[in-house]
Structure formats: C-alpha cells, structure tokens
Image (cartoon, rainbow, N blue to C red):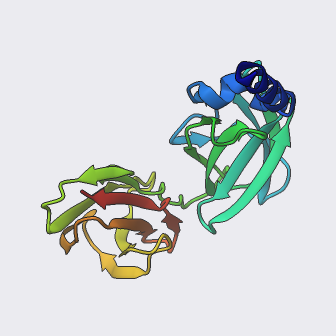
C-alpha cells in the first residue's frame, strides 16, 4: 500500500511540472549557453547606424533544444542601467547607445538559474569618435567569487582596464561588506590597492571606476570574495 501511495505522489509531482522544469532539469547539472556575438572584450563596429547616438546590433548565441524562450540581460556599463529582453530564437536585435560599453548574458526565461551563459562585455563603438571610453575593469586578484585563506588579515586588490586612447588617469575604488559598496578610495594612480584589512567569515564586495584624461568613465561589475 505504501509503495502505491508513493508512486501516486510522484505521478502528481511530475504532472505539475512544466516542459522547461521537468524532473531531469531539477536533478540534472546546469547547462551553459554559449555566447557568439558580439565577442567578449571586443570593440564592436558591426551595428547598423540608426542615428548619431544610436545603432542596432544583432546579438547571437548557440541555441539549446529544451529552451523555448531566452532572456537577455543587458547592462549599460556607463550608467549601470539594466534592460531585459526575450526572444524565441538564439538571436536578438537591440538598439544601443553608440560609444558606450555594455555587458550581456543569456538565460532560459523559465529556468534562469539552471540554464544560462557567462557574462560578456563589449564596447559599442561610435564611428568617428575622437575619444574612447576605457574598458570596464576586470578583477585579477582576488578573482571574482574567490575564497581566500581564513587566516588572512589583509587583502591586495588588483584589476585591469584598457583604453584605446591609452589615456587612463586614475581609478576610484569602491569596497565594503555591502553588495553595493561605498567609495573606499578615489583618484588612485595604480591599478591595485594593497593591505586592506579583512575579517574571517565575511564576504566583501568591490568595484572600480576607470577614468581617462577626456573625462570618460567606465564602471566595472561588482566583484566579491570571501575570507575563509
């Protein structure tokens, strides 16, 4: 009798699952969507000109058979403004600001935590621009999401940012325990900050604003690491 009841409960459970959330997905490994275009850390000039300030770009990625609807998350790295779009095909046309850095990622609309891509960034180039915005900083050490030794009492933050004009003049560092960290130090001349005190068992968050001689700025994603 107990065996029959158990089988009935499983049947009810399976009957309530949607096509994109079946038992195999719930129990199986995560699936990575492979991004194709625009390429990571690239300067993209392939957009169709719409106006002096905007262009339209076709984003491409590899399709997954089990995904019916994809969700794109697009972030303007100058303003941190986030937009979300949906598509039933592994491609999407989006209107972008010219001379602006962006990051983007793709996920399944129904299972965004189970089926998703990495996050890529690119610079949507503005033809004829005389000044280029620095690329958003990337974390070198600690790597984003890393766990450092529980015995560590300080941490050395190192990052990298590039500028086509080669005129980076400084960095503003934001750091703290809040996931939207406050300004920690401004106008740093070097792409590192050494000897920041940390405590075991705490997760810290940080980001970098890169500035050039023309007044252009780019904002990195928020990085994190845990002590211990």
Q: Quadrant of residue 157?
A: bottom left
Quadrant including the N terminus: top right
Please name whichever residue, 187 or 85, is drawn nearer the observer in this view of the structure: 85
Residue at coordinates 16% horizontally, 68% vertically from top-left? 154
- The answer to whether one can see residue 62 in this image is no
Quadrant including the C terminus: bottom left
Q: Compared with residue 98, is residue 9 higher up or lower down, i.e. above or below?
A: above
Q: Compared with residue 146, is residue 10 higher up or lower down, i.e. above or below?
A: above
Q: Percent from the top left, x then y, of residue 176?
A: 37, 75
Residue at coordinates 52% horizontally, 69% vertically from top-left? 216
Please name whichever residue, 162 or 91, is drawn nearer the observer in this view of the structure: 91
Q: Percent from the top left, x then y, of residue 122?
A: 57, 45
Q: Quadrant of residue 34?
A: top right
- The answer to whether one can see residue 119 in this image is yes
Please name whichever residue, 201 or 182, is drawn nearer the observer in this view of the structure: 201
Residue at coordinates 61% horizontally, 27% vertically from top-left? 27
Q: Compared with residue 37, is residue 24 higher up or lower down, i.e. above or below?
A: above
Left or right, 137 with respect to 21, comes to left
Q: Percent from the top left, x then y, of residue 21?
A: 76, 32
Left or right, 143 with respect to 120, comes to left
Left or right, 192 with respect to 145, comes to left
Residue at coordinates 38% horizontally, 64% vertically from top-left? 168
Tell how many labels.
0
Please name whichever residue, 156 or 167, is drawn nearer the observer in this view of the structure: 156
Q: Percent from the top left, x then y, of residue 187?
A: 33, 79
Left or right, 199 with respect to 3, comes to left
């Amino acid at each position: 009798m107990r065996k029959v009841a158990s089988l009935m409960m499983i049947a009810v459970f399976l009957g309530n699952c949607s096509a994109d959330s079946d038992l195999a997905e719930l129990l199986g490994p995560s699936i990575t969507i492979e991004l194709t275009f625009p390429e990571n850390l690239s300067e993209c000039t392939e957009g169709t000109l719409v106006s002096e300030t905007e262009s339209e770009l076709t984003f491409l990625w590899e399709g997954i058979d089990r995904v019916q609807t994809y969700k794109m998350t697009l972030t303007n790295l100058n303003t941190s403004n986030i937009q979300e779009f949906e598509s039933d095909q592994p491609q999407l046309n989006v209107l972008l600001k010219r001379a602006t850095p962006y990051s983007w990622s793709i996920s399944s609309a129904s299972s965004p935590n189970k089926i998703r891509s990495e996050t890529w960034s690119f610079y949507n180039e503005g033809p004829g621009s005389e000044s280029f915005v620095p690329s958003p900083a990337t974390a070198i050490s600690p790597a984003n999401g890393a766990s450092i030794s529980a015995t560590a009492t300080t941490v050395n933050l190192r990052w990298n940012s590039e500028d086509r004009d080669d005129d980076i003049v400084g960095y503003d560092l934001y750091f703290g325990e809040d996931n939207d960290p406050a300004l920690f130090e401004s106008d740093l001349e070097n792409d590192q900050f050494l000897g920041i005190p940390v405590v075991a068992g705490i997760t810290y968050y940080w980001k970098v604003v890169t500035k050039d001689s023309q007044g252009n700025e780019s904002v990195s994603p928020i990085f994190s690491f845990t002590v211990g």
